[in-house]
Amino acid sequence: MRCVHRISAVFVALSLMIAAADSFASGLNAKKKKTGIPVVRWTDGSPDSTLVKGTDGIYRYTLSYETASVTVAIDSQELEKTRRTLEHVFRVVLTVRNRGTLPFDVEPQKMTLELADHFHVLLRSEDPDDLAARIQDDSDELVHQSERELKKYPERRAVVEARLREHEKVVAQWQEYLSAKTLRGMTLDPGQAEVTGLVFFPTRTKWTGDWKKEEHLILRLPIVKVVFEFPFTLPPPGEVPQLRERSD
């Protein structure tokens, strides 16, 4: 009888342990589901997803959910143009619309760009003020280097000064560009229901290495209580490579 009681006690203990483990696992799952943010994904053919291929080479992906609509405009040749851009930044043009009556915040600083072909590295959007300051710092450093070069090789003055004037012109254009056209955080409401602006991502990081000729990327933007997700490939499938000048 004692042996039977001992076996019964062991089974009871095991049952309690299993029940506790199940309860703990359920709690974790519930917590994960409770804290997870729903994702709304751009999908070709979906009634909430549209794609417009412009004659200017710009691909405009639009995704709608409830009262929010987001359009991401991407140059089909952005990979090539990024390599020639000051600071080597990757850019997208974002348009957000509020079609409802309740306000919601647009927070471009929370945007991320996932590089699927680089171990799924996440790039966070650049703060436009930080980017402007970095460009100015690099420009100041170039001035200092040029001054040192002129002290050592004064016969190069004409070439060095011409190079500096051209660089300072480019820097001034970029500073104005960043000030006027970048997307800032704001609230959309019936008084201002739409906003458009540029968002930049860094391309020179210790994790990414050289960009490939073809890249698979995922752009994400949290709005209200969901994440808008845009998967795309650059250059787009079927796109004929023919580098165009970037326009404002």
Image: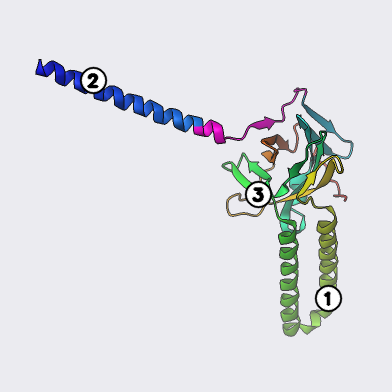
C-alpha distance separating marks 1 and 3: 36 Å
**Residue 189 locus on image (x, y percent):** 82, 41
Vertical side of 245 occupied by 223: above or below: above
User: Colour scheme used in the picture?
Assistant: rainbow
**Residue 235 locus on image (x, y percent):** 75, 38
Residue pictured at 57% horizontal, 35% vertical:
36
Q: Earlier in the sequence, mark 2 or mark 1?
A: 2
The circle drawn on residue 124 is: 3
Instruction: Tell me the quarter of the picture where residue 188 sits.
Output: top right
Picture mark count: 3
Vertical side of 164 occupied by 199: above or below: above
Q: Earlier in the sequence, mark 1 or mark 3?
A: 3
46 drawn magenta: yes
C-alpha distance separating marks 2 and 1: 87 Å
State whether residue 130 appears in this view: yes
Residues marked 1 and 3 touching at CB (< 8 Å):
no
The circle drawn on residue 11 is: 2
State whether residue 243 appears in this view: no
Q: Which residue is the site of mark 1? A: 161
Name the kind of residue labelled 1 in the image. Glu
The circle drawn on residue 70 is: none
Magenta stretch in the rendered image: 31-47
